[in-house]
């Protein structure tokens, strides 16, 4: 992913924020929904309340059948009708259109029936009055006795009793009795108009009553239906709210759990993603700071760290280049100084050698002078002996010079060869022996009488020994003892060579610097400060090691170890 | 007396000085020379410096403390200024640096002997 850290952070922050916002909006939506649903429940409850009140008024009206109760009834119906028609269409659509339609129709029917019923009641009242009037009329007619004998006063009175009973009880028995009584009118001859009118009035009342029963039944049915509808709506809305709550609860719980689990995971992932390239860069820089300049920061991510890594790598390139040129310069400088140190040692040796040369030269000159003066008197044998002496002494002088030249480096070979270290040590001692002679320094030698082979370069090893011995001689000024001791280690795997002097010693704080280049305690001009550092590097190149022990006022001991000659290991040595 | 660890020096000086009429005895070791001093009387001592255990400087000191009249001539290849100064301080007659011409030595010996005679 080629995202910048900035982008990653934006993503890391905006995604959880977005989730929280969505969660918040969802909760808001649910709460709003709950409010709406609660409103529906209230509406449903209100409708139900109204219907229950209507039913109460209905019972009262059916019981009392008065206009007063009719008014109550009517007004409660109007209230319901208003309530129902005040409900907005949107809510009706949600709660149930068909039910509301049914509700409205039912209310309408209910009202119509009520009006019919009221009419019926009024009609009944009128009819009852009419029956009573006709009854009274019939009674007075019978009382005049100007009619058929069958129509007795008793019969009429009996009929009126039946009529009253019916009016009072309005049950089947009284109805049947009244009906039976009326049927007897047919037996009355001649035709009695009053009778017919009375019977007609009663029949009319019976019809009104039949209508009334039917109307009342219908009214109750519709009332029940109204109750049922509002009940259904109310229960269903409550059920809806309850299930909505439970669903919402589940959903919110799931979202919460997801947020709890995914939130930290997402944050962790984002953080890891952001930190990863920085961490990688930090690790690389740490390793580079530990010294490996060849390492480079990886250019994997195309974010802000890319540029950082690039700049860092450029800086490293420059640093490495500078370091390499510095190393090269230092190497050159080192080579020059090694040469200078060698010249310094050489100067020291030359003064000894020059004096040593005087001996054979003196012998030659003395022999020559003797010959010059005594040539005539000399025998032939004597002459030969003298010439031989001159030759021998010349040879001796030549040998002295050769030794010096060997050290100077006419023998430039850098090859590592099988060397007898004891022999090399002897030759090195010989190189400084002239210096020992001009001072009061005594030499104590403790070396094996048999050869010990190592792999090395003769001139380099001589340089090591000479450097250390020259240092020792300088440390002792003009008197002391130079002790050189060589002993093989256990199993003949190493040889240990100790070169000790009885000089001024080295202070403890100076000891750790003594193998450092250019470190010297000698006065300016007497040493380059490279002798021991050159010795140190040469010993290392021979896979050996060198250490120093010193006591101020007592002397110093340099201990050198060389590994024994081993065919399998051939260390390389550079020409310094 | 001639003391030098180089046998050739002793041999040549013996021959050359004997030709001049001196009696010459040579030694190659300092210790032998010191023994010789106890046996015989010498008029002049010619010695080298560097000779192992008993060197010319020790002979000079010995002679100057036991036979202060005997002049000591030092012949050495190690002609360092400090050594020469030390030798003169210890009472050397002459300090000759190798290689030297025999005439030079002859003159010095002659001068030493004449000085000794005067005393």
Image (tube, coloured by chain):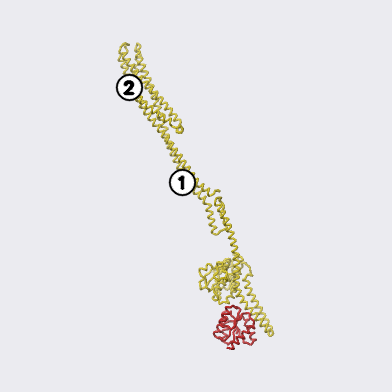
Q: Is residue A568 visible?
A: no
User: Rounded to the nearest whole Å, what is the CA distance between mark 2 and mark 1?
Assistant: 79 Å
Q: Nearer the viewer, residue B62 or A526?
A: A526
Q: Position of residue B11 (x, y in %)?
A: 63, 83
Q: Nearer the viewer, residue A283 or A42?
A: A42
Give the secondary structure at mark 2.
Answer: helix
Quarter of the rendering containing residue A205: top left
Locate the C terminus of chain A and report the quarter of the image it occupies.
bottom right
- Return the chain for callout 2: A
Q: Is residue A186 depicted above or below B101 in this figure?
A: above
Q: Nearer the viewer, residue A494 or B80?
A: B80
Q: Which mark is residue A260?
A: 1
Q: Position of residue A307 (x, y in %)?
A: 56, 52
- Residue identifier under label 2: A168
Q: Colour of chain B?
A: red
Co-location on one chain, circles 2 and 1: yes
Q: Which chain is yellow?
A: A
Chain-order first, disc 2 or disc 1: 2
């Amino acid at each position: 992913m080629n995202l910048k850290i900035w982008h990653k952070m934006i993503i890391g922050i905006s995604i959880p924020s977005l989730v929280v916002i969505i969660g918040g909006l969802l909760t808001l939506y649910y709460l709003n929904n709950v409010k709406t649903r609660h409103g529906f429940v209230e509406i449903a409850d209100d409708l139900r309340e109204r219907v229950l009140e209507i039913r109460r008024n209905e019972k009262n009206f059916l019981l009392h059948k008065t206009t007063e109760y009719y008014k109550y009834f009517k007004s409660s119906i109007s209230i319901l009708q208003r309530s129902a028609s005040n409900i907005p269409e949107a809510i009706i659509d949600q709660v149930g259109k068909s039910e509301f339609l049914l509700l409205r129709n039912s209310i309408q029917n209910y009202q119509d029936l009520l009006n019919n019923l009221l009419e019926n009641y009024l009609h009944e009242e009128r009819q009852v009055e009419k029956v009573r009037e006709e009854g009274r009329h019939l009674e007075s007619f019978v009382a005049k006795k100007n009619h058929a004998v069958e129509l007795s006063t008793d019969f009429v009175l009996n009929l009126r009793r039946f009529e009253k009973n019916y009016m009072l009880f309005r049950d089947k028995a009284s109805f049947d009795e009244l009906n039976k009584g009326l049927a007897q009118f047919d037996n009355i001859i001649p035709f009695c108009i009053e009778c017919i009118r009375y019977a007609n009035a009663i029949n009319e009342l019976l019809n009104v009553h039949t209508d009334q029963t039917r109307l009342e039944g219908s009214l109750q049915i519709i009332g029940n239906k109204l109750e049922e509808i509002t009940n259904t709506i109310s229960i269903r809305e409550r059920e809806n709210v309850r299930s909505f709550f439970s669903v919402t609860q589940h959903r919110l719980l799931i979202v919460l759990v997801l947020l709890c689990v995914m939130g930290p995971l997402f944050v962790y992932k984002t953080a890891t993603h952001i930190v990863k390239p920085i961490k990688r860069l930090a690790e690389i820089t740490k390793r580079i700071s530990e010294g490996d300049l060849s390492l480079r920061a990886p250019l994997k991510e195309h974010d802000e760290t890319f540029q950082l890594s690039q700049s860092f790598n450029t800086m490293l390139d420059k640093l490495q280049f500078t370091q390499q040129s510095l190393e090269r310069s230092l190497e050159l400088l080192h080579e020059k100084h090694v040469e200078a140190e060698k010249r310094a040692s050489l100067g020291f040796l030359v003064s000894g050698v020059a004096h040593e040369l005087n001996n054979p030269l003196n012998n030659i000159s003395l022999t020559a002078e003797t010959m010059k003066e005594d040539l005539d008197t000399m025998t032939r044998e004597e002459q030969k002996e003298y010439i031989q002496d001159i030759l021998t002494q010349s040879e001796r002088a030549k040998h002295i010079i050769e030794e010096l030249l060997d050290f100077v480096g006419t023998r430039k070979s850098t090859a590592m060869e099988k060397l007898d270290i004891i022999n090399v040590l002897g030759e090195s001692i010989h190189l400084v022996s002239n210096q020992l002679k001009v001072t009061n320094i005594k030499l104590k030698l403790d070396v094996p009488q048999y050869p010990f082979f190592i792999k090395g370069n003769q001139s380099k090893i001589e340089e090591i020994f000479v450097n250390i011995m020259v240092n020792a001689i300088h440390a002792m000024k003009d008197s002391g003892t130079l002790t050189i001791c060589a002993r093989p280690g256990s199993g003949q795997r190493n040889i240990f060579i100790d070169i000790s002097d009885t000089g001024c010693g080295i202070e403890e704080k100076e000891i750790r610097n003594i193998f450092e280049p250019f470190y010297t305690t000698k006065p300016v001009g007497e040493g380059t400060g490279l002798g021991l550092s050159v010795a140190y590097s040469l010993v290392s190149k021979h896979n050996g090691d060198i250490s120093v022990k010193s006591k101020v006022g007592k002397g110093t001991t340099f201990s050198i170890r060389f590994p024994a000659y081993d065919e399998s290991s051939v260390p390389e040595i550079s020409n310094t | 007396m001639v003391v030098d660890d180089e046998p050739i020096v002793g041999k040549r000086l013996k021959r050359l000085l004997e030709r001049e009429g001196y009696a010459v005895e040579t030694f190659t070791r300092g210790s032998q020379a010191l023994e010789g001093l106890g046996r015989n009387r010498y008029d002049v001592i010619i010695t080298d410096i560097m000779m192992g255990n008993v060197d010319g400087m020790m002979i000079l000191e010995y002679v100057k403390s036991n036979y202060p009249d005997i002049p000591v001539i030092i012949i050495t290849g190690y002609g360092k200024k400090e050594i020469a100064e030390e030798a003169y301080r210890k009472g050397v007659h002459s300090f000759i640096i190798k290689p030297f011409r025999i005439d030079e030595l002859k003159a010095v010996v002659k001068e030493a002997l004449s000085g000794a005679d005067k005393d």
